[in-house]
Amino acid sequence: MEPVNLSDFESLARARMAEDAFDYVSGGAGDETTLHLNRAAWGRWAIRPRVLVDVSAVDTSTEILGTPLAFPALIAPTAFQTLAHPEGERAMARAAAAAGTLMIVSTLASTRLEDVATAAPNGPRWFQLYCYRERPVTESLVRRAEDAGYQAICLTVDVPRIGRRERDLRNRFAMPDTAVPRNFEEDLDLDTVPTDRFRSDLHAWVASLLDHTLTWEAVDWLRSLTSLPILVKGVMTAEDACRAREHGADGIVVSNHGGRQLDGVLPTAEVLPGIVEAVGTDLPVLVDGGIRRGTDVLKALALGAAAVLIGRPAFWALGAGSQEGVEQMLTLLQGEIELALALAGVTRVADLGPDRVVRQITAETGTVRA
């Protein structure tokens, strides 16, 4: 099957990946309510197109924290990409660079952060970070990211504990030998982990590293540690967005971890407008969760997001066809964004505003504004 949209890569990846690895990537927490709501919520917003606009030239380019991008969709940080393909993060980085966009590299990558940088030396990249119980380990990762040319730190803050992911429990998912958290080799002797704990019980191993006492002090500490821009990822309320700004964050990522942490929280499309309103134009707000179409990207930008993050579709595309698969997925997405803008009567990403979308009538809302 030749994929014609992002969702097509899911079935292609399912056919090629190990079943338990596919479920690890595709599943969510609990009943997976939030996982499904993330996708459905973008459909609750409708586009208000304008007509008789010259759209012979439509520009999808944008800039985030000083980095120019061909289109406003970044590769979200996803762990252990060798589960999808042996080239893993290397292939993902090369594809992002070829497409003119930015990759956020996970701390739990199955490729050392330095090797990801070497694979695509001219591609922009950020480093996703958890604040670990052992602060020297966290500091070491930050220093290595700086030395390897990463341009920002994306601090994930919505994992004080690991969500209950029942697909993994049912599958008794064990991390294969090909997927190892390589970024920890310099600070932790992985060979001495009892019974290869990160393989036999990944969630427990990660939980053992995390600092469960984490507070906003960690953002202050990280701010004192590096001059790189810091984005706080995992914000779901206006109150926390304002706190992030107060503690020196340079950006916010509205995210519920793809429905993999606390099940039953609101979808990101629902909370995005309130967060944007709370922080104003002080700092860029990005969003992830359920984005599958160029029209979803248009809606997110109209609601105030500076860009979106693409997670599972990038992983599926990697599983479906390595670097070429991810490049194909990104090309399809950019094409959809360009067409959506043209059909909505918009020639530049910067021209999108809240007047271009409207809340649709649904059983939940019962009303719509014109």
Image (cartoon, helix red, strand yellow):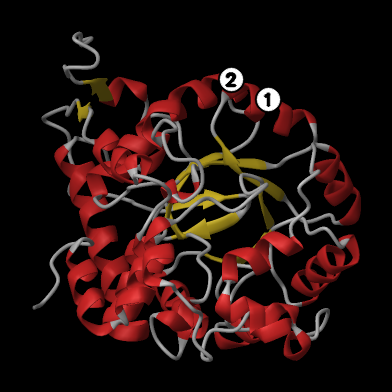
Total numbered circles: 2
Provide residue 357's location: percent of width, then percent of height.
27, 25
For the point 28% across and 69% down, the residue is: 329
Quick one: 256 or 52, which is closer to the camera? 256
Quick one: 17 or 251, which is closer to the camera? 17
Q: Dividing the picture into quarters, in which one does residue 116 lie?
A: bottom right
From the viewer's perspective, is 335 left or right of 109? left
Q: Amino acid at mark 1?
A: Cys
**Residue reaching furthest to the left:** 1
Which residue is tagged 1?
Answer: 242
Quick one: 339 or 35, which is closer to the camera? 35
Which label was assigned to residue 278? 2
Q: Quadrant of the N terminus?
A: bottom left
Provide residue 344's location: percent of width, then percent of height.
18, 35
**Badges 2 and 1: C-beta atoms under 8 Å apart?**
yes
Question: Are there few (<14), some (14-19), or many (20+) residues within 10 Å of tag 2?
Answer: some
Q: Amino acid at mark 2?
A: Ala
From the viewer's perspective, is 288 left or right of 194? left
Q: Quadrant of the C terminus?
A: top left
